[in-house]
Image (spheres, grey):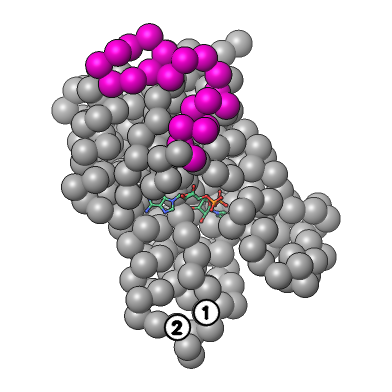
Amino acid sequence: QLRLRSALALVTGAGSGIGRAVSARLAREGAAVAACDLDEAAARDTVRLLGGPAREEGAPGGKHAAFQADVSQAAAARRLLEQVQACFSRPPSVVVSCAGITRDEFLLQMSENDWDKVLAVNLKGIFLITQAAAQALVSSGCHGSIINISSIVGKVGNIGQTNYAASKAGVIGLTQTAARELGRHGIRCNSVLPGFITTPMTQKMPQKVQDKVTGIIPMGHMGDPEDVADVVAFLASGDSGYITGTSVEVTGGLFM
Ligand code: NAD
């Protein structure tokens, strides 16, 4: 049974890792996918992976479409929602914010620039996308499910990631507050807290660190992007119809 047959899903950070796996999973559930990334070629590659002809603005036909946007820029986030609505003639009913970056450094050495950059993409970006998507849904009277990718690091911290941990903790609070404000409009908001997932983001960690991390995961291995995508698909679907404001950990048991 296709749980998202009539859904339009906007996925940011769709050009890589978790965002790409989420796009593929939601498409398999029947959703049309608007795949957005800072890297336009990567977003296009994701749409190609989903199969079928791409839908171009003004030339409907294909099911999925690629979009370029920097989610940390307010004008770009607003324009993205406008472009998606113009392309599909409706606002996205599922919105998954996966765009995120790391700029790791110990607290004692972290630059203001590394702090600002990570907060701009990981936290302000999610504020801008959540706000623009909610405005589009409320003004058209549509229900929706907004899913924001936080991290277990936002709950427990991580050495070398004051900026990242702060941004991810912020995502949890933002999402809970959005859930409180938007529930009456039929819009659910939940966050997902992945642990260590095999993607380009974690593959750039030194092998020694990867081995150390794996050693403390109760399930004994890092997760796959598909493990996160499965949970996102549940939160996007009616199977989670009475779940809002929660944060689901997908960690293989790390930091119970
Ligand atoms: P990734 O680096 O593979 O993918 C991130 C994508 O986001 C890239 O395609 C990148 O181009 C895009 N992006 C970056 N800045 C952007 C911007 N300003 N606007 C639009 N797109 C932008 O990373 P990933 O591991 O797939 O991570 C996806 C999300 O999951 C991130 O929010 C990350 O913090 C979170 N997360 C990842 C892990 C993990 O172990 N991989 C764990 C916890 C949380």
Callout 1–callout 2 Cβ contact below 8 Å = yes
Q: Where is residue 231, by image quadrant?
A: top right
Tell me if mark 2 has few (under 14), some (14-19) or many (20+) residues whose alpha carbon lies within 10 angstroms of its own.
some
Residue 49 to residue 195: above or below: above
Residue 164's spot in the image, x, y percent?
Answer: 47, 67
Q: Which residue is mark 2?
A: 110
Tell me if mark 1 has few (under 14), some (14-19) or many (20+) residues whose alpha carbon lies within 10 angstroms of its own.
some
Could you say which disc has been placed on residue 223 in the image?
none
In the image, the residue with mark 2 has its CB under 8 Å from the nearest atom of ligand 1: no
Query: In the image, is residue 105 part of the stretch drawn in magenta?
Result: no
Q: Nearer the viewer, residue 109 or 39?
A: 39
Q: Secondary structure under badge 2?
A: loop
Which amino acid does the dot numbered 2 rest on?
Answer: Met
Magenta residues? Answer: 42-62
Q: Is residue 191 visible?
A: no
Distance Cα–Cα, label 1 vs label 2: 5 Å
Q: Which residue is mark 1?
A: 105
Residue 123's spot in the image, x, y percent?
Answer: 36, 58
- Which residue is at 59% across, 77% downward? 159
Q: Relative to residue 87, is residue 231 drawn left or right? A: right
Q: Where is residue 253, by image quadrant?
A: bottom right
Residue 77's spot in the image, x, y percent?
Answer: 26, 44
Q: Is residue 65 visible?
A: yes
Which amino acid does the dot numbered 1 rest on?
Answer: Glu
Q: Nearer the viewer, residue 75 or 25?
A: 75
Q: Relative to residue 50, is residue 95 drawn left or right? A: left
Residue 116 to residue 236: above or below: below
Query: In the image, is residue 56 part of the stretch drawn in magenta?
Result: yes
First in sequence: mark 1 or mark 2? 1
Q: Relative to residue 94, is residue 180 drawn left or right? A: left
Residue 138's spot in the image, x, y percent?
Answer: 21, 30
> Which quarter of the figure is the C terminus placed in?
bottom right
